Image (cartoon, rainbow, N blue to C red):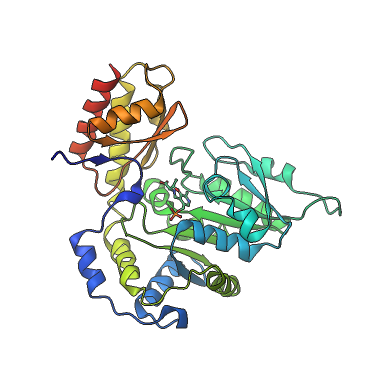
Amino acid sequence: MKSLIDLRSDTVTRPTPAMRKAMSEAEVGDDVFGEDPTVNALQERVAQSLGKEAALFVPSGTMANQLAIKAHTQPGDEVIIEATSHPYNFEGGAGAVLSGIQFYCLKGGRGILDASQIEETIRPDDHHFPVTRLVCLENTHNRGGGAIYPIEKMAEIYRLAKSKGLLVHLDGARLWNASVAAGISPHEYGQWADSVSVCLSKGLGAPIGSLVAGSKIFIDRVHRFRKMFGGGMRQVGIIASAGLYALDHHIERLKEDHLNAKRLALGLKEITSVSIHPEHVETNIVIFDVSQTALTAPQLSEAMKRNSVLIHAFGKTQIRLVTHLDISKEDVETALKAFKKVLS
Ligand code: TLP
């Protein structure tokens, strides 16, 4: 049987044999009591790497973001966020349900906002208005095609937030991709946010797990809400060890994923009906438009599936491809051949 080339997401990776070995040997304890040594080691390591006092291990990136929003806000508060961001679009409306907040959405170029846009949105101190409490940023930006937040923009937004008494949360599900591609450490990015969420189960290739990091007081609140949301886990060192393994072995190699994403974009550019900007591909995500081709995005996705390549259709006209640990240079070449066959 021909093996599938799965470009739908970097969440599809399977743990490598070495990662599975690390998992099988993990020391464990009851993490709800704070007694899992492997989880504690992971939390300390991630907190330190982000320049934060503490971090908490949680099942998913969605839970990490939503716990941060919950811990930072009161019901009725307003959260400023980019209109195509993950917490606003792809977390099931959780901000409204779990925290009772409302989002104020701003449109950014490839997901990136300017401080001036945010400044205009901050509510005056008037009882007619909701209280503006939090700004959420996303680096890299998923729907922005893996765009890297320029660190100067993050710094400017953070300084504005501090001058107005606001908090900043960074959805850093793919922060290591940004870090490797821009040559900027997670610590440097971390200084421009009060809290940061990171995912081990995307480019880093762990099977499960995200963390949220911030001050000790903030993480204490997050811990309470994690219990409330049912996210307390027990002998979870088994999966935390996969995260530790990934931090040791899978960060530098993200460069290969970025190179493969660029190769995909440059190859697709050769298909004249495809609208793509290879220069926009900065990390492991490639988004392109097929409205000038004979197929809709879902039709293209079906046709590619028949050629053993899985891709993700966004609406009628956009396709997203994501490179990862299980995608080789040869897979990229095979996928490009299939695209050329299907689209010409
Ligand atoms: N993104 C997934 C899907 O949910 C769309 C993907 O395939 O890209 N923040 C960002 C920026 C994300 O891209 C994701 C996952 C999350 C948060 C949520 O992480 P999980 O899936 O662990 O809840």
| Quadrant housing the C terminus | top left
| Quadrant housing the N terminus | top left
- Depicted 76 relative to depicted 49: above or below: above
Q: Residue furthest left?
A: 1
Q: Does the image show residue 113?
A: yes
> What residue do we see at 44% from left, 29% from top?
318
> What residue do we see at 36% from left, 73% from top?
236
- Depicted 33 relative to depicted 75: above or below: below
- Depicted 43 relative to depicted 259: above or below: below
Quadrant hosting residue 261 = top left
Image coordinates of residue 270 in percent, x first then y, are: 30, 20
Nearer the observer, 59 or 332: 59
Q: Does the image show residue 277?
A: no
Image coordinates of residue 146 in percent, x first then y, are: 43, 41
Image coordinates of residue 193 in percent, x first then y, are: 57, 58
- Depicted 95 relative to depicted 33: above or below: above
In screen coordinates, is 222 left or right of 46? Answer: right
> What residue do we see at 36% from left, 42% from top?
284
> What residue do we see at 42% from left, 51% from top?
174
Image coordinates of residue 6 in percent, x first then y, are: 28, 41
Q: Residue furthest right?
A: 127
Nearer the observer, 300 or 143: 300
